[in-house]
Image (spheres, helix red, strand yellow):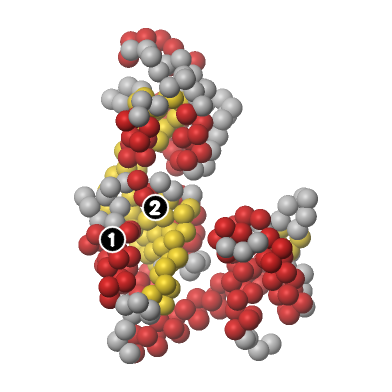
Amino acid sequence: MQIHDVDLKLLRVFVAIVECGGLSAAESRLNIGRSTISSHLSDLEVRLGIKLCKRGRSGFELTEPGRVTYQASLELLQQCEAFANTVASSKNELSGRVSIAVIDTMVSDPRCGVAQAIASLRQLSKNIQFDINVCEAREVETSVINGRSLVGLGVSRHHIRGLEYIPLHNENNYLYCGKGHDLFTLNDKAISEYLLDAEVITSNYMRDREVRNDGLNYQNSASAYHDEGIAHLILSGEFIGYLPEHYASFWVDKGEMKVIQPEKYAYNIPVSLITSKSNKVNPLTNAIVDALLVSHKD
């Protein structure tokens, strides 16, 4: 089949639906309503002559042709982006879409230089578009691998083949309780007596691996996969959990959270700038990497 502009638009919608896990979840990313998204998906299925997914009360699930189409769509869209970047570089100008995947709450880290990097690139060229994808830790690497993002800012202790990791800094994480929790008003000695009974929030895979040996009470009665979710649970006063220091400080300063024995319950995670080794010749990738490294604060 011949590919037209409208097909590329529909394929981008389809990719967003898959990566968000459904039509409703894709609304905020695409900035269009669910009915419009559904219409675009139906149009694509008619255009291709295949059923791409099952959708309904049972949830969203790709068909086998849908999985094949998703992978092919990623490759096609990457090739289109590469073509645009190559043409732009031949004219000695930066042009195209800079997509950056970042772990949630990075904006509260004073060392993060994403905003400054964007500003510096805009000074170089007004023909650059920006796409910021806020992801759970594992999704940052996936986003770079599948080409959805040019670069990622994330945490990883086990590097994936094909990706390059440039160390930036260590993120310090501590154990916190909320103002309504029984531990909030206790001193360190008293906290030690009652801490093992406190219910701890189960968080993402990396933090679980790092802190499961702390001897605390993990009952799986509360879980969250983003720091914002963990913060909500801590602020309820019912659970304790680990958060990055730079993120929790907002509530600590307001007297709504308290750090628990930081000399004992603490760990750090290395934050890296993640790129695909196959993108090294892309001038846009090189430009955003350089801008992020320059703007990063140790």
Task: Please report the residue visible at 29 percent of the width from the left and 44 percent of the height from the top.
Answer: 170
| N-terminal label among 1 and 2 | 1
Residue 64 occupies quadrant: bottom right
Element assignment for label 1:
helix
Q: Nearer the viewer, residue 52 or 38?
A: 38
In the rendering, at what x and y percent does residue 261 appear? 32, 22
Q: Is residue 161 visible?
A: no
Distance from disc 1 to disc 2, alpha carbons, whole Å, reads 18 Å
Which residue has dot 1 on it? Answer: 116
Q: State the image coordinates of residue 264 (x, y, percent, origin top left).
A: 32, 24
Amino acid carrying label 2: it is Gly
Quadrant where the N terminus sits is bottom right
The residue at 62%/74% (across/down) is 11
Foreground residue, 113 or 164? 113
Identify which residue is drawn at 41% across, 62% down.
100
Give residue 94's position: percent from left, percent from top.
Answer: 33, 80
User: Mark 2 = which residue?
Assistant: 154
**Element under disc 2:** strand
Check whether the beta carbons of the residues at disc 1 and disc 2 lie within 8 A of each other. Answer: no
